[in-house]
Image (cartoon, rainbow, N blue to C red):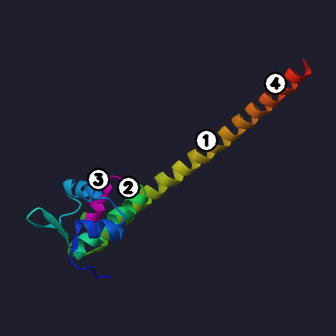
Amino acid sequence: MSYPILTIREMCERFEVTARALRFYESKGLLNPLRDGSRRLYSNTDCAKLKLILRAKFYGFSLEEISQLLEIYHSDNLEYNKLTAIADIAQKQLAALEKQQTELNRAIESLRHELDTGLRDLKNCAVLKQAA
């Protein structure tokens, strides 16, 4: 998909991000818009980078990992070693997400048990209070 040169407002609308987010990504070196005075102008490459940034952010990658991915992905040639590096980064993130999911499932089950116990105790207290 090809995009024309976009202003910061148009980027915000197209990708549903804030201007602050775009400026933040620029300050971290992830985006490099052209400048026309104080105006930022975003190219097709910037659009592709932002799409990758947002996808990687959704998957929970750190800014450092996103920077590495952008560097690898937008290099002149995607050779085997570069593709392997991308796959390694993605596999590590998948393992981290799966670990978080396991921990969340355990926490949910534990909280559910504690809540059930607490509600049962509360109900018993109410019954005892009515009996008195």
The residue most toward the top is 132
Q: Mark 4 or mark 1, which is nearer the start of the sequence?
A: 1
Q: Disc 3 to disc 2, how far (Cα)?
A: 8 Å
Question: Which residue is located at x 52 percent, y 48 percent?
Answer: 100
Q: Mark 2 or mark 1, which is nearer the start of the sequence?
A: 2
Circles 1 and 3, Cβ within 8 Å, touching? The answer is no
Q: Is 63 covered by the magenta stretch?
A: yes
Question: Which residue is located at x 78 percent, y 29 percent?
Answer: 122
Residue under numbered circle 3: 64
Q: Disc 4 to disc 3, how far (Cα)?
A: 53 Å
Q: Disc 1 to disc 2, how far (Cα)?
A: 23 Å
The residue closer to the viewer here, 2 or 41, is: 41
The image quadrant of residue 80 is: bottom left
**Residue type, numbered disc 4:** Cys
Q: Nearer the viewer, mark 2 or mark 4?
A: 4
| Part of the protein shown in magenta | 61-70
- For disc 3, the neighbor class at 10 Å (few under 14, some 14 to 19, many from 20) is few
Question: Which residue is located at x 25 percent, y 57 percent?
Answer: 25
The residue closer to the viewer here, 46 or 88, is: 46
Q: Position of residue 86 (x, y in %)?
A: 34, 65
- For disc 1, the neighbor class at 10 Å (few under 14, some 14 to 19, many from 20) is few
Residue under numbered circle 4: 125
Q: Is residue 39 left or right of residue 132?
A: left
Residue under numbered circle 2: 61
Q: Is 65 covered by the magenta stretch?
A: yes
The residue closer to the viewer here, 2 or 99, is: 2
**Residue type, numbered disc 1:** Ala
